[in-house]
Image (spheres, rainbow, N blue to C red):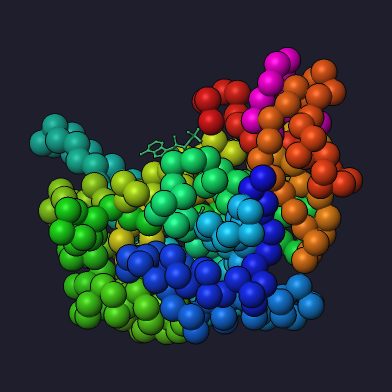
Amino acid sequence: MDVFRLAHPDDAAAITEFTRAAQAGLTTVPRNRERVDAYIEATQRFLAGEASANRLLFVVERDGVVMGISGIIPKLGVERPFYSFKRSRHARHSSQLGLRTEYETLQLTTDFDGWTELASIYLAPEARGQGVARLLSLGRLCFVEAHRALFDDRLMADIRGWVDEAGVSPFWEHVTSKFINTDFEIADRLSANDGRFIMELLPSLPILMNLLPDAARICAGRPHEISRGAMNLLMGAGFEETELCDIFDGGPAISCRADATLIARTVRGVESYRDGPQRLMAFSGAAADFRATLTSGDVAQGHVSEAAQALGDVRIALAQDRRNGQ
Ligand SMILES: CC(C)(COP(=O)(O)OP(=O)(O)OC[C@H]1O[C@@H](n2cnc3c(N)ncnc32)[C@H](O)[C@@H]1OP(=O)(O)O)[C@@H](O)C(=O)NCCC(=O)NCCSC(=O)CCC(=O)O
């Protein structure tokens, strides 16, 4: 059985083993032992009531082997403002010339300050394509549902933005690097710790998108191919697209109210179960004892798998939305 739980110090070596290969651009994925240790230490401090620690790292374990990680940042904007670009549409019309023009602007904002972020999903390459990602992703929504007081009622996720075959981000090349004139990897790494340079260097004035090459313009809000699965899982669990995107690679920010996730809706009975077997999330316990697993059953008929019942005082939620097949 695959089990979703909080990471603890004994997991650090196994996590570093597979996150070591993660590419730049996955800003919140800890890629070396030092950062893995720091993430786990923050997790323990946050659970002990130290709000400034502000990070929770989870793992999915199969038969004692850690296969992947995911995270929650309980409150954005605590250590520094959380910057995004907000896309706005503008239209102009000239009756004199009979011409109409439309353009978009990007404006630096801190709209997500105070929100809770879902971040850092990463699965060992050999464990991909087996459904584990759904548990890694939705397990966090179960944790939020079980610990509502720890989180904001607005949830967001910053999906990695599109890059070309050479790994180059057109958005970075044509937009952000014009103001932050350094390597993407350097800026990305620095921003994970201290992002003061963002406010110091990025303009507070709107950036006119129609002056950009198409290759860069279409990257505002466009996800990286390898991150579509991560986005798809959250969109299937109630998240929606927003007008905001990442300031480095233009990746889309998606959001959902905490009480509108698929997990919250089914746990609270806002959404009823249909007849027949369905994919389910089962979760129980709190804090370090919290456990979630992916299972199936026919809840309408009262049938839930033994694996789920083994969790003890279990709560059940839909793990797949009936509307879009997710
Ligand atoms: C993202 C994950 C964890 C996803 O794991 P898997 O590859 O095993 O996913 P999967 O099970 O194959 O796919 C998950 C679900 O999305 C669907 N799916 C997969 N690829 C798709 C695509 N291109 N378009 C549409 N749907 C797609 C699958 O059918 C599946 O649904 P069914 O189960 O119905 O078949 C992994 O690929 C990974 O570690 N990638 C590298 C790191 C990364 O890019 N992380 C995301 C960065 S963005 C981020 O971190 C913030 C968001 C967050 O933390 O959640």
53 or 31, nearer to the observer: 31
Q: Position of residue 289 (x, y in %)?
A: 80, 61
Name the residue rendered at 13%, 53% in the picture. 213
Left or right of 16 on screen, residue 267: right
242 or 269, which is in the foreground?
269
309 vs 167: above or below: above
Relative to 165, residue 190 above or below = below
User: Which of the 4 image quadrants contains residue 305?
Assistant: top right
Image vertical order of residue 85 relative to residue 281, above or below: below
- Which residue is rendered at x = 76% and y = 39% of the image? 307
User: Ligand 1: which quarter?
Assistant: top left
Q: Nearer the viewer, residue 5 or 93?
A: 5
Q: Which residues are magenta?
A: 269-280
Residue 113 is at least partly visible in this image: yes
Question: Whole-percent x and y of residue 22?
Answer: 37, 65
Q: Is residue 319 above or below residue 38?
A: above
Residue 277: x and y, percent? 69, 21
Residue 233 located left or right of residue 213: right
Q: Is residue 37 magenta?
A: no
Q: Residue furthest left?
A: 97
Residue drawn at the location 21% of the way across and 60% of the way down? 167
Rendered residue at 39%/44% (across/down): 228
Query: Which quadrant does the N terminus fall into?
Result: top right
The magenta stretch spans residue 272: yes
